[in-house]
Image (cartoon, rainbow, N blue to C red):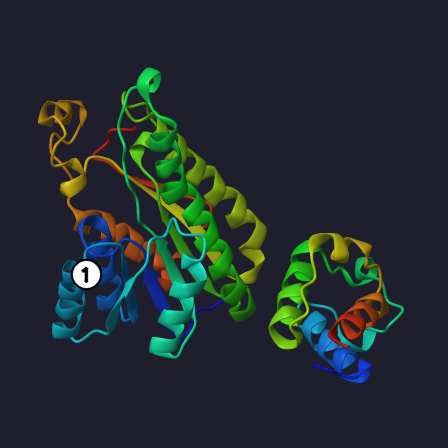
C-alpha cells in the first residue's frame, strides 16, 4: 500500500492527540518527551500503524524514534 | 471516568466456557447484557447447551471451538467472536484451565509444560490480543481465573500452583501498564468449587475450608460479573478470593 507522507502525518497527529497533547503542539520537530508521549502510547501508535498501513513496528524501531517527524518518516518509508 | 452505557458496544469471550466455572461465567455475563462467545476445546455439546440456555433466557451467545494452548488460538477466536457479533471483544475471561497433578519429585516435563501452556501462557496471549482493541476503545475488562492454589500450597499441584501464581503477578503487572486506558485487569482466585475438576479430589480436604462447604460455580461467576461491571471501573490489579476463607 502506498500512502503519502501527508496522509501519514495527519494520521499520526490524530493518534498522538488522542493520547493527550493538543494537536497544534504535535509538529514534526516535537519530541515525544516534550509531548509527554510515553512507551504505552508508542505501543498503541504502532498498533494503529500496523492495522491501517500493514507496517509492523517492533520495539527496537520505536526506541529509535525521538520526534514526530522521525515516526512519520519511518512509517512512510516502510509503507512504500 | 463515567461509564454511561454498560455493557459497552462490545462482546465478551469466555475461554473454557462449556462447563463448570466457565459455563456459569458465560451465563452470568449474558444475563448482564453481554453477547458472549463461549469457547470450548472438546465439549461441543456442552458448549451448545450453554448457548441454548443463554438464548432461552433472552441472551446472545455463540459456541467457538479452539484449544487455547495453540499459539494461533487467540487471533482465531477473537476474529470469530468479533465477526459473529459485529463488535470488538471488550470483556475477556481467561478461564480455560487444566490440571496434571503429581508430586514434584515425579512430575514430568510434559505435565509441567501442559499446565503452564494452558493456564498461564494462553492467558498472556489472549490478554495481549484483547488489549489491542481495548486500549483503542479506552475501555475493557479482563478477568483471569487464578486459584487459591496460586496463593497457598497444595501438595501434588506444583505445576498448577506455579501457573496460577504466575497468572496473579501477570495480572497485576499488565493491569498497571494499561490502567490509564480505562482497561481493568483483575484475577479471581476460587478455592474448592464443585465442578468436574474437583470431583475426584478427597472430600476430607473440605475440612480445611472455614466455610465447611464447597463453593458453587455461580458464586465465582458473581464475582467475575462484578469485576466486569461498570461499577468496578476503579478496581484493577486486584485478586478476589472466592474460597470460603481458605486463604484468609
Tell me if B162 is positioned left or right of B220 in this view.
right
Residue depicted at x 51% and y 61%: B182
* Above-or-below relation of B150 to B224: above
Count neighbours of disc 1 (C-alpha within 10 A) and say few if under 14, some if 14 to 19, many if 20 or more: some
Q: Where's residue A13, x and y in %?
A: 75, 75
Percent of width and height locating residue B125: 47, 52
Taking depth in this image into account, of A40 and A4 the one nearest to the observer is: A4
Q: In the picture shown, does residue B218 fall above or below B8?
A: above
User: Relative to A30, does residue B84 appear above or below in the rendering?
Assistant: below
Q: Is residue B20 left or right of residue B89?
A: left
Q: From the top left corner, tell me how far across and down residue A27 is, in percent.
A: 85, 74
Question: Which residue is more in the foreground, B1 or B217?
Answer: B217
Quadrant occupied by the C terminus of chain B: top left
- Report the residue at 33% width, 53% height from top: B67
Residue B84's spot in the image, x, y percent? 34, 76
Q: For the point 42% across and 48% down, which residue is it?
A: B122
Residue at coordinates 65% horizontally, 59% vertically from top-left?
A: A43
Q: Does residue B39 appear in the picture of this structure? A: yes
What's the chain of the residue with tag 1?
Answer: B
Quarter occupied by residue B205: top left
Report whether A3 appears left or right of B73.
right
Quickly name the residue at label 1: B44
Amino acid at each position: 500500500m502506498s500512502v503519502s507522507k501527508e496522509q501519514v502525518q495527519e494520521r499520526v497527529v490524530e493518534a498522538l492527540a488522542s493520547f493527550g497533547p493538543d494537536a497544534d503542539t504535535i509538529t514534526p520537530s516535537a519530541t515525544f518527551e516534550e509531548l509527554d508521549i510515553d512507551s504505552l502510547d508508542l505501543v498503541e501508535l504502532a498498533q494503529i500503524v500496523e492495522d491501517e498501513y500493514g507496517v509492523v513496528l517492533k520495539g527496537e524501531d520505536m526506541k529509535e524514534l525521538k520526534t514526530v517527524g522521525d515516526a512519520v518518516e519511518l512509517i512512510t518509508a516502510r509503507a512504500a | 471516568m463515567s461509564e454511561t452505557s454498560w455493557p459497552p458496544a462490545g462482546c465478551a469471550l469466555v475461554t473454557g466456557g462449556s462447563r463448570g466455572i466457565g459455563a456459569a461465567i458465560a451465563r452470568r455475563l449474558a444475563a448482564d447484557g453481554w453477547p458472549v462467545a463461549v469457547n470450548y476445546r472438546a465439549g461441543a455439546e456442552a458448549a451448545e447447551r450453554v448457548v441454548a440456555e443463554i438464548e432461552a433466557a433472552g441472551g446472545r451467545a455463540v459456541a467457538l471451538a479452539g484449544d487455547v494452548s495453540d499459539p494461533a488460538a487467540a487471533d482465531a477466536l477473537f476474529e470469530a467472536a468479533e465477526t459473529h457479533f459485529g463488535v470488538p471483544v471488550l470483556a475477556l475471561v481467561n478461564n480455560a484451565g487444566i490440571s496434571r497433578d503429581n508430586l514434584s519429585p515425579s512430575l514430568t516435563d510434559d505435565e509441567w509444560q501442559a499446565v503452564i501452556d494452558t493456564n498461564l501462557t494462553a492467558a498472556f496471549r489472549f490478554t495481549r490480543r484483547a488489549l489491542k482493541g481495548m486500549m483503542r476503545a479506552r475501555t475493557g475488562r479482563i478477568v483471569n481465573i487464578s486459584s487459591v492454589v496460586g496463593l497457598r500450597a497444595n501438595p501434588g499441584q506444583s505445576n498448577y500452583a506455579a501457573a496460577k501464581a504466575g497468572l496473579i503477578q501477570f495480572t497485576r503487572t499488565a493491569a498497571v501498564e494499561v490502567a490509564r486506558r480505562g482497561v481493568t485487569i483483575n484475577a479471581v482466585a476460587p478455592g474448592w468449587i464443585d465442578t468436574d475438576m474437583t470431583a475426584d479430589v478427597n472430600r476430607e480436604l473440605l475440612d480445611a475450608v472455614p466455610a465447611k462447604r464447597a463453593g458453587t460455580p455461580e458464586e465465582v461467576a458473581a464475582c467475575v460479573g462484578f469485576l466486569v461491571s461498570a461499577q468496578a471501573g476503579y478496581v484493577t490489579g486486584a485478586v478476589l478470593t472466592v474460597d470460603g476463607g481458605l486463604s484468609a
